[in-house]
Image (cartoon, grey):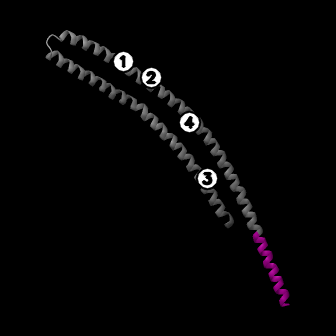
Amino acid sequence: MAYTTHITTAFEMQRATIEQSQRAFEQTLDFQQTVNEAVVNGFDSQESAQRRGVELSQTVLHSYLDIVESSVPGAAGSVDEVRAAVDEQFDFLLENHAEVFETVAAEYEQGIDAYDELTADYVEAVDEQVEMLVEAHEELESQSVDVAEQWGEQLGDLQEQVTDVQEQAAAAVDA
């Protein structure tokens, strides 16, 4: 048994390392999924911030047109036409802005879904391979322990034989 303690300990440490590596791999994939979700959640915030920026630009331009209208006599009709054209362009920009974000978010989410599906298949395959590796490792440990026990028994038998021969030699010398 003394011969097998170190062998068993070494195999247990190796298996623990394999299992820790597998957990670290899975945690890395979980982290990537969390990052992906954060990116998707960030699309709404980014769209909202950019929309506010566009709307602020429209407000600033309206304020400028108000100043022009109030400071230039007879410019009211022209300013109204410019204001209508500006509003039309901003409406078009905001509509396209929303569509672009919807498209980008949908495409990104589809990519994430495909990635998650592929990752799940990959994790399942890795889990199966690790399970087979651990089983083979346990079998190798069992065989190694058996060999060490047999070797220990043979060494013990050999030591007994050497002791017997030494005792016989000492008795023969004394006689």
Is label 2 or label 3 in front? 2
Quarter of image, res 41 = top left
Residue linked to disc 4: 119
Under tag 2, what secondary structure?
helix
| Residue at 35% over, 19% down | 93
| Residue at 25% over, 13% down | 82
Residue 15 — which label? 3
Residue contact at pointers 4 and 2, CB within 8 angstroms? no
Please state which of residues 72 and 93 is positioned toward the viewer in this rendering.
Answer: 72
Q: Please check the rendered image and state whether residue 154 is part of the magenta-colored stretch, yes or no.
A: no
Question: Which amino acid type is shown beneath numbered disc 2?
Answer: Thr
Relative to residue 124, is residue 150 drawn left or right? right
Residue linked to disc 2: 103
Q: Please check the rendered image and state whether residue 160 is part of the magenta-colored stretch, yes or no.
A: yes
Which SS type dominates the magenta stretch? helix
Mark 3 → mark 4, Cα distance in angstroms: 24 Å
Under tag 1, what secondary structure?
helix
Residue 95 — which label? 1
Mark 2 → mark 3, Cα distance in angstroms: 47 Å
Is label 3 or label 1 in front? 1
Ranked by sequence position, the earlier of labels 2 and 3 is: 3
User: Which residues fall within the magenta stretch?
Assistant: 155-175
| Residue at 77% over, 68% down | 154
Ranked by sequence position, the earlier of labels 1 and 2 is: 1
Ranked by sequence position, the earlier of labels 3 and 4 is: 3
Quarter of image, res 122 = top right
Please rate how many residues cluster around mark 2, counting C-alpha atoms within 10 Å: few if below 14, some from 14 to 19, many from 20.
Answer: few
Q: Position of residue 115 (x, y in %)?
A: 53, 32
Residue contact at pointers 3 and 4, CB within 8 angstroms? no
